[in-house]
Amino acid sequence: MRIGVDIDGVVADSYPYWLTELNLHFGKNITVIDDYEMHLAFDVSRDAMNDYFVCNAERLLMSPKPIIGAKEGIEALLREGHEVIYITARTLEERDVTMRWLTMCGIPHKHEHVLFAGFSSKLELVKQWGIEAFVEDYQVNAKLIAESGVPVFLLNASYNQVELPKGITRCHNWDQILEGIQAIDCKG
Ligand SMILES: [Mg+2]
């Protein structure tokens, strides 16, 4: 199968690092991100948050560790004959640092299979690329993709605690993601 995989919150454990850095920068003491739209959690404008990320992209995108089990999970998918296409909401300006981070962490990727949706829709890329299953952490993207008929595996996070519609399976780790993908692959 051709599997779409998000990066932040799925492969890169970005949020714990960002939380620490954002608390320092904005002088806050937020302990849990309960809203994916972090500017809301930090009570700053969307522009202020974007500016901070643009000016500090190198550090903010190179420092996070991989999500536990992600590297092994992706290796397992490739071994089982699946194709892995990364689809991130990061922008093209962040392409270079993203590639370096994937390489640094030893996470298998083909350059032409890392796609940057930026501020446009991930769903369009999912359709264009014929993605057959998707791994995501943001419930809004998960819903859009699931509604188009593509099964979604949502990696559990503090900011995605909502009731999930049909087509989205909540997973607590990469082992559960692999099990879910194997199950739909068998049904084929
Ligand atoms: Mg994400």
Image (spheres, rainbow, N blue to C red):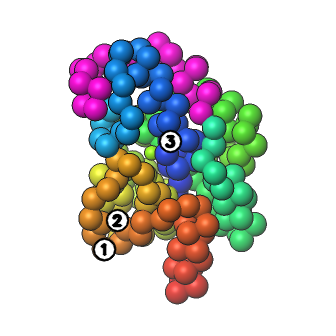
Residue under numbered circle 1: 166
Residue type for callout 2: Ala
Question: Does residue 55 show up?
Answer: yes
First along the sequence among labels 1 and 2: 2
Alpha-carbon neighbours of circle 1 within 10 Å: few (<14), some, or many (≥20)? Answer: few
Residue type for callout 1: Lys
Apparent side of residue 81 relative to residue 147 in the rendered image (left or right): right
Ligand 1, by image quadrant, is top left
Residue 63, given in percent of the width and then of the height, sits at: 62, 27
Residue at mark 3 to residue at mark 2: CA–CA distance? 19 Å
Residue under numbered circle 3: 8
Q: Main secondary structure of the magenta part?
A: helix
5 or 48: which is nearer to us? 48
The answer to which quarter of the image holds residue 40 is top left
22 or 54: which is nearer to us? 22
First along the sequence among labels 3 and 2: 3
Residue 102, given in percent of the width and then of the height, sits at: 67, 38
Image: magenta residue range: 40-64
Alpha-carbon neighbours of circle 2 within 10 Å: few (<14), some, or many (≥20)? Answer: many
The answer to which quarter of the image holds residue 45 is top left
Q: Is 160 one of the magenta-colored residues?
A: no
Viewer-nearest of labels 3 and 2? 3
Residue under numbered circle 2: 146
For residue 54, above or below residue 122: above
